[in-house]
């Protein structure tokens, strides 16, 4: 049964190798999920807090808190093992009332209000990644967690 997963990120994938990796994982996830990928334009404000706030307001326009479980990606979020992530993903996709919405911030991170609105704030690593690499890592982990959920050999 295909379920919906939404990804809202600041900034688009610019280089062909990012786009190719994105297509690769979307193709692998397609039998399981309908992936909605929404892009928010980055702000060009010089003040970093104002920039994050402006980007955050743009993100808020793309989400529906009634239908979505908000999961923000942030370096200071909770670190999960793949097995823990797969457990949460299974809960999120099996929810009859909401579907997961992963939020990836811009170059300077997420507005604090977005993190406060989120049901979960998770970290893919203590390292800082570009929004492009973060999206690809998220997709790979979604596929890996899906292989755990459905008993496929990809995760070993």
Image: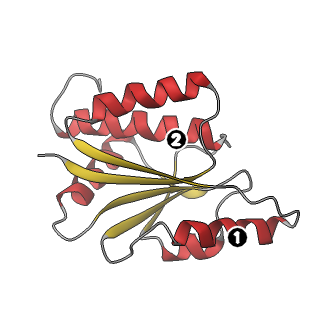
Residue 120, percent across and down? Answer: 44, 65
Which residue is drawn at the image coordinates 29% and 28% (left, top)?
A: 28
Between disc 1 and disc 2, whose residue precedes? 1
Q: Is residue 138 left or right of residue 41?
A: left
How packed mark 2 is, by other alpha carbons closer than 10 Å (few <14, some 14-19, many 20 or more), is: many
In the picture of the structure, the residue carrying the numbered disc 2 is 135
Query: 149 above or below 43?
Result: above
Residue 16 lies, in percent from the top left, at 59, 23
Point out the residue furthest to the left here: 1
Residue 112: quadrant of the picture: bottom right
Q: Which mark is residue 54?
A: 1
Q: Residue at x 53, y 72 (%)?
A: 60
Q: Dividing the picture into quarters, in which one does residue 50 lie?
A: bottom right
Disc number lying in front (1 or 2): 1
The secondary structure type at the circle numbered 1 is helix
Quadrant of the snapshot with the C terminus = top left
Q: Please state the horizontal and vertical placement of residue 147, each as a whole percent of the image.
A: 24, 32
Describe residue 118's horizontal placement relative to residue 66 as left or right: right
Q: Residue at x 65, y 55 (%)?
A: 41
Q: The residue tagged with tag 2: helix, strand or loop?
A: helix
**Mark 1 to mark 2: distance in Å?**
21 Å
């Amino acid at each position: 049964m295909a379920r919906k997963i939404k990804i809202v990120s600041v900034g688009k994938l610019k280089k062909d190798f990012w786009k190719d990796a994105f297509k690769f994982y979307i193709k692998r996830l397609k039998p399981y999920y309908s992936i909605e990928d929404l892009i928010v334009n980055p702000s060009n404000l010089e003040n970093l807090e104002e920039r994050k706030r402006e980007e955050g307001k743009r993100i808020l326009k793309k989400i529906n808190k009634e239908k979505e479980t908000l999961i923000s990606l942030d370096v200071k979020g909770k670190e999960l093992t793949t097995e823990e992530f797969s457990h949460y993903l299974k809960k999120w996709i099996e929810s009859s009332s909401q579907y997961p919405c992963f939020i990836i911030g811009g170059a300077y991170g997420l507005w604090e209000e977005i993190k406060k609105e989120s049901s979960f704030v998770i970290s893919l690593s203590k390292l800082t990644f570009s929004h492009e690499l973060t999206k690809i890592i998220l997709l790979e982990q979604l596929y890996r967690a899906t292989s755990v959920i459905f008993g496929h050999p990809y995760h070993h």
